[in-house]
Image: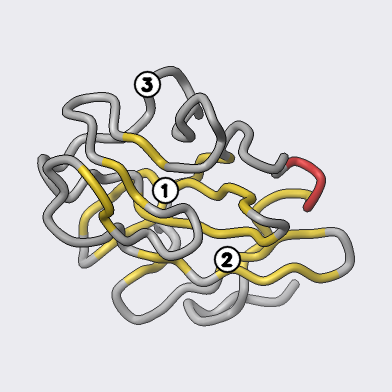
């Protein structure tokens, strides 16, 4: 058995689980020492991931479980106060957002999506 270091990529989901403009795939991370929810989505053919935390008020964005895209599938929308974010960059584009979402690096290989931890964004230790 091998041990995984904090900077090794971590398998998140099958690539086909991320539908274009569809449901997010949630996962848990430790961000700056705090346990947080994160999510992965697909937009314009590419997988993206962010902390599930609005920059206006630190609430999760979902308006229903794993539904973060607006009805058009073109924007990420915070259910609490209507902050709007660009799905490809996480940049705040409308509403009361205070900057952009915290982006989490992803890669796709062999039909799988992997997330890439950093020194401040790590897997939760159990």
Residue tagged by mark 3? 63
Residue 98's spot in the image, x, y percent? 12, 55
Tell which tag, 3 or 1, sits nearer the viewer. Answer: 3
- The residue beneath circle 1 is 38
Query: Which residue is identified by label 2?
Result: 115
- Residues 71 and 56: in front is 71
Q: Residues within 10 Å of mark 1 (few under 14, many from 20)?
A: many
For residue 52, side relative to residue 80 (left or right): right
Tell us which disc is closer to us: 2 or 3. 3
The quarter of the picture where residue 59 lies is top left
Instruction: State left or right for residue 55 relative to residue 110.
Output: left
Q: Quadrant of the N terminus?
A: bottom right
Q: Which residue does the image show at 39% across and 65% down from the upper left?
A: 103
Q: Secondary structure at mark 3?
A: loop
The residue at the point 17 percent across, 50 percent down is: 55
Label 2 to label 1: alpha-carbon separation: 11 Å
Helix, strand or loop at label 1? It is: strand
Q: Distance of mark 3 from mark 1, alpha carbons?
A: 15 Å
Q: Please provide percent x and percent y for residue 13.
A: 71, 49
Which dot marks residue 90?
Answer: none
């Amino acid at each position: 058995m091998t041990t995984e270091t904090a900077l090794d990529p971590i398998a998140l989901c099958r690539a086909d689980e991320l539908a274009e403009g569809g449901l997010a795939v949630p996962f848990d991370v430790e961000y700056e020492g705090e346990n947080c929810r994160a999510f992965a989505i697909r937009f314009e053919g590419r997988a993206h991931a962010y902390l599930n935390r609005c920059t206006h008020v630190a609430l999760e964005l979902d308006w229903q479980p794993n539904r973060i895209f607006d009805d058009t599938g073109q924007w990420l929308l915070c259910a609490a106060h209507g902050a709007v974010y660009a799905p490809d960059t996480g940049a705040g584009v409308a509403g009361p957002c205070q900057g952009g979402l915290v982006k989490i690096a992803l890669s796709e290989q062999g039909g799988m999506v992997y997330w890439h931890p950093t020194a401040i964004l790590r897997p939760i230790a159990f």
